[in-house]
Amino acid sequence: MFTNVLLPFLNILILVSLLLYFIPPSIISRYLGANSGVIGFSIAALVGSVTLIPGFVSYPIAAGLIQQGASYAIVATFMTTLMMVGVVTLPLEIKYFGRVVAILRNALNFVAAVIIGLVVGLILGQLL
Amino acid sequence: MKKFFKKHRNYVWVAAYVILTILSFILGFNPGKAVFTNFTQSFIEMITFVPFLFIIVGLFDVWVPKERIQKHIGQESGVKGIVLVVLLAMLQAGPLYGAFPVAYLLYRKGASIRNIFIYLGAFSSMKIPMLGIEIGYLGIEFSLARTLVSLPLFIGIGYLMEWYLKNRHFEVRDGSQ
């Protein structure tokens, strides 16, 4: 079973690493930093949704963002979309759940992630 | 020729990638090297967690009979079922795509649609190993706020998916084709 899924997984990883080359962490940090406001929030949500960054790489980025003065709402949105929404992994997800369901799951999770980001920002006292 | 490509489509990308990477290193093509660094990071994540996930899935498949699963996380399982799938997801680790095969197994064993999607939600955002790393980097307040806000939302998504898919012949497929 594992060898059957290994190949599709490897293909996704190749796609992910190509994408990350075009959207490197340094660029992410630049656009999501302090006072990036609504634009930063939107970029966080979009970049988080499209890319897939492994946890042990994304958490240091997030911690760096907070240190730079990025808002909690932006960081929470970025982390949540990274975790819950996967546009690059969509082809793989479609194989399991079918096109409609995979897209629907991602869309619902995107909405949820935006709500989560805003509410977490509100709770921690730093909306945008 | 076309048939050959179709049959080995999955291999073609991996093979092309391997060749291009080797070429990048020989020719000193920096973007190629950078892509390879990204690849190793994702690959390490996959190779450390996903095989473990498959061992658990395998054992689960052999040891736990369908009736048991159906009873505990099936159609009639209610709140207890939700608690169980969330706990199951929290005990695991790895990237979200690693959870798709588990979702397939849960489906085959009779888990309800609602619980399959709640499982995916919990897997994506509440895995204990990941929470540990998150608390280390972003602090307990952040993690607590994020998890407590996420929980009701992905449970809601589970109910929404169930409501939408109830009479639509939804099935989870093997995914390896």
Image (spheres, coloured by chain):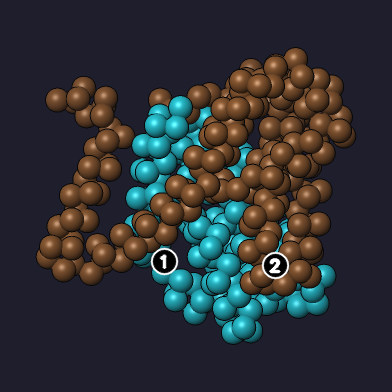
Chain colours: A cyan, B brown
Disc 2 residue type (three-letter): Ile
Which residue lies most toward the top here? B67
Q: Residue furthest right?
A: B79
Residue indicated by mark 2: B135
Q: CA distance from mark 1 to mark 2?
A: 26 Å
Residue at coordinates 46% horizontally, 27% vertically from top-left?
A1
* Disc 2: CA contacts within 10 A as few (<14), some (14-19) or many (>=20): some
Task: Give the residue drawn at x 50%, y 34%.
Answer: A94
Q: Given the image, what chain letter belongs to the residue carrying mark 1?
A: A
For the C terminus of chain A, the quadrant is bottom right
Q: Residue A125: horizontal and vertical position, in percent? A: 80, 77
Q: Secondary structure at mark 2?
A: helix
Would you name the residue on which mark 1 appears? A23
**Image side of residue A125 versus residue B8, left or right:** right
- The reply to whether label 1 and label 2 mark residues of one chain is no
From the image, state whether disc 1 or disc 2 is nearer to you. 2
Residues B150 and B85: in front is B85
* Relative to B24, B111 lies left or right: right
Residue B165 point in image, percent of width and height? 69, 26
- Figure quadrant of residue B6: top left
Residue at point 31%, 59% (across, down): B36
In the foreground, A3 or A66: A3
